[in-house]
Amino acid sequence: MGEVAVQALRGVSFEIEPASFVSFVGPSGSGKTTLLNLIGCLDKPTEGTLMVAGADVAALDRKASAAFRGKTIGFIFQDFNLLPVLTVYENIEYPLLMVQKIPPAERQQRVTALLEAVGMADQRDKKPDQISGGQKQRVAVARALVTNPKLVLADEPTANLDHGTAYMVLNLMKKMRDEFKTTFIFSTHDQKIVGEAETIFTLEDGKLNGTTSKGGNGHGQSL
Amino acid sequence: MGNLFKIAIRNLLRYKRRTLLTASLITVGVVFVLAFVSVAGTFKNMMIGQITDSMIGHLQVHRKGFVASIETLPLNLNLKGGAIGKLEKILNEQPEIEAYSPRVKFGGMFSNFTETSSIRLTAIDPEREFKTVPLLPERVSDGSKELKPGGILIPELLARGMKVKPGDAVVIVATNADGSVNGKQFIVAGVMESATGPGGRDGYVHLNDARELLRMEGQQVSEYVIRLKNFGNMASFSEKLDALLAQELNPQGKPMFELHTWEKLSPFFNIAQMIDLMTFFIKLMLIAIVLISIMNVMIMAVYERIREIGTIAAIGTLPGKILSMFVIEGFCMGVAGALIGDLVGIALVWILNLSKISYNFGQQKGIILQAGVSPADILMISATVIIVSVIASLQPAFKASRMEPIQALRHT
């Protein structure tokens, strides 16, 4: 039995402005996660051009991709994906320590500032298994932002959160966008959460089916 | 680097039972090897000490061709006047030599006036001989430990078989170099135990008596026995002395002397080699234990943390750093196993010594085991464990570092 090639995305073309708050929506299997993986340099397109923050990421090799991700992109995962052996503080510090090699004083200042910003300063020494799901996602947001990335990708960031906590995390991401001028791109199929996005790309069967913009940040449909 | 160690140690402590089990396995291996190396090494050193210090010496020099014909104890291959002078001059100039002693070896018939048996005799200068093979007098189990002219030290089995005891008169009959047979009466000075176990037909007489019995004209020596100040330098000194002796040529232009270490002269060297071989295989077993246990635990660790690997890879951790994380885990486990194993091993050797375990070697009964473990052995075993631990974790670590983040993140 050989592997079956599945074309997850076809003919998708769009641009996203810096510091925007963008959501990809669509049913399961519509290609949202694949698109986020492509933008996040975790996957490569079989054809076409993919420019992220001015770089042709399709041409990057494995090591260069990792370096690019560490410098340019922050990730927020559906399951939070915090490292269980590290404390809240250490999880946020991890990219600065292991990826960017930031000096200790600056590291401390940036981590402390983000801990305050996401309201987790009093939980800094707790391990991930000692905090709630909403708190974990706040830590994940802080970890994604600590490297001052140009872009943060969030794949179903609220899927494992209750409604109230999901709104809180979304508002936090918006606040962070305003404060750090970072572009936030997230995927979701939760229509209530979608309402928080300024630009909404709708995907269906691997194709971009429509674009909705609020507040002048959208660019209309570009297929 | 410190942070990599911190993460590695925390990950190891995350699966306490598994880490403890693996570290314990390594510890048991290290303890076993240390105890074996210590006991086997002590036995080997004792055996070598007994053989060299009570019989063979560290090195021996003969006239070229003597050792090949040693079974017949050929008197015509003895060193004579000029050769003896040259050899003693060379030996006197070597600061590594603590003492050396000339010997004449010959075969003869031993008679108690009613029965006769064969005997192999070594004629010695007791003062020089006892400095060169200091445990020789200890082998005298009955009678005087001194050997004066006219006296003979005879092997225990011969004394028992011929029913002679210290103070009895015996006769030695021997054939000299020109073929004539001569006899001389001796008084049994003492009865000797064999250095290597039951059997043996070797006796000792004074060098002056041998010269008289064998009607030797001028000085003759079958062999020179050499004792070094430092036994550990035997190999290097042997090379040096061999080179010096090789320069001494006979009138035919061939080498005059031959040099042998105790290893070439005693069959017990094979036992020493067997002990070394067994030690080697025991060390191989340790390597196998460490290799399999560390590799197993690291493969498990990588499998269980695929999503974590995906996460750290996604947020930009370079493959080399991911590899280091897992290799350091293996390294830490190896260090822990080696350290605990060393401590327990040293304690076990100490307890063994406290227990005063006794054993027999040759005719010597009730030798108390005094096991010792050298820092070099501890370092070598620890280094082996740590290096093997790192090697064992390389494959799983490499696999982790090569994982595609997207696939790792999808892993459930």
Image: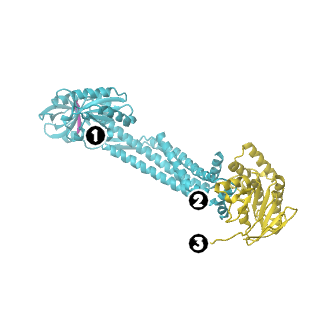
Chain colours: A yellow, B cyan
Q: Is any atom of residue B149 visible in this view? A: no
Label 1 belongs to which residue? B194
Residue range in magenta is B201-206
Residue B157 vs residue A197: left or right?
A: left
Residue B31: x and y in percent read 49, 48
Q: Secondary structure at mark 2?
A: helix
In magenta stretch: residue B205: yes
Quarter occupied by residue B237: top left
Q: Nearer the viewer, mark 3 or mark 1?
A: 3
Judging depth in this view, the residue of B410 and A34 nearest the camera is: A34
Callout 1 amino acid: Ser
**Relative side of B108 to B255, left or right:** left
What number is the disc on residue A2? 3
Chain ID, mark 1: B
Nearest to the eye among marks 1 and 2: give it.
2
Residue position marked by numbered label 2 in the rendering: B300
